[in-house]
Amino acid sequence: MGFAKLLIFLGVVVVAAAQSISDNSTIHSDYYIDANRRHYREMVKDYDQKLHEFEAVYSGRIHTIDIQLDFLMDGLNEVEEELSTLELLSDFTQQCVKNYKHQLPGETNTTIVIRNCSDTAMSHYKHLVAAPIDTRNEMEYYLNTTFEMKLSNCNGISNSSNATNQLNYTLCVTTVISEANTFAIINHKTFEAQMAAASCSADGYVKTALDCSFTAQSQAQADIAGTKTHINSCVKGLDCAPTSGYHCQYSETIPASSVNSTNATMPNPFYGRNETYACLMLDIV
């Protein structure tokens, strides 16, 4: 009778020990799962951070065009204010301003042309990040759906304290994690390659936008400088624009430094012209 009780006691101890081992195995597996789950979620967060930084850098580079446009418009407004003041000085200066003010670049048209440069570049942004965003979403979907579903299937194996089942559960978990790691590595390489390609394409779009803006701004600045030069020449009495109604459509710009009344010669305004015109107006600047 005493021996039978001892066997029963030992049996209880063995079952309890097996249950303890089973519980410890499950706990360790849970830690292992949680550690990998956190790692995958950090990957998605890292993707989001890189996409955010890419957008900030890209839009920031394009935004320099708007800043340059603001400076250009400020300069144009200053010139217009100067000319408005000059018009009040006398009838003569008013006429000089009237003769050439129309040559100033229009604020609205200039703004439209330059902003079209930046808007076109920004319109490419969604295309640039479309592929890496899809890759990021694939990782998140795998983590939230495929990964969790496979782990759930493993949990069905761990419902029993049977040692074989516990071993099968551990093998199931490690297999799921191994598959997830493989997916994550491939996904990460794909994302990095797509971001590198997006960065390369972005450089091209930014260069095109800056070249477009530079051309428009250079033309506007040239028009502003030309208008001021003509008005200043007019105010100084050096304007050769006809006032009697006669106008010559052909003109040759000659720097004032080349005009010397004590010299019998000067640069030939007809040099290089293949035609003989009925008239030629000298625009001395």
Image (cartoon, grey):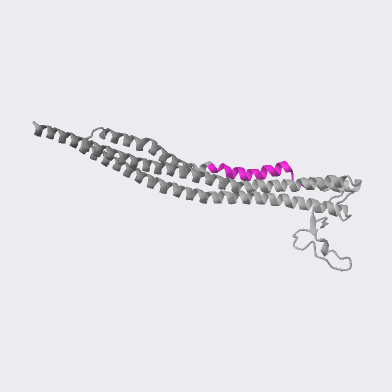
Which picture quadrant has residue 147?
Answer: top left
Q: Is 81 in front, or is 172?
A: 172
* Left or right of residue 252, residue 22 in this image: left
Closest to the observer: 281 or 258? 258
Measuring from the top left, give residue 152's x and y in whole percent: 32, 34
Q: Residue at x 83, y 61 (%)?
A: 256
Residue 230 forms part of the magenta stretch? no
Q: Nearer the viewer, residue 121 or 277?
A: 121
Front in this rendered view, residue 19 or 97: 19
At which x and y percent is residue 226? 78, 53
Residue 151 placed where, x, y %?
32, 36
Quarter of the image for residue 240 reads bottom right
Instruction: Give, as a single range, the part of the protein colored magenta.
Output: 103-125
Screen quadrant of the N terminus: top left
* Residue at the image point whose x is 26% and y is 32% from the top: 159
Q: Is residue 190 above or below residue 169?
A: below
Tell me if residue 255 can be seen: yes
Q: Position of residue 31 (x, y in %)?
A: 34, 41
In the displayed structure, does residue 50 sit left or right of residue 106? left
**Residue at 82% from the left image edge and 52% from the top image edge:** 230
Q: Quadrant of residue 135?
A: top left
* Above or below 263: residue 229: above
**Magenta part, dominant SS:** helix
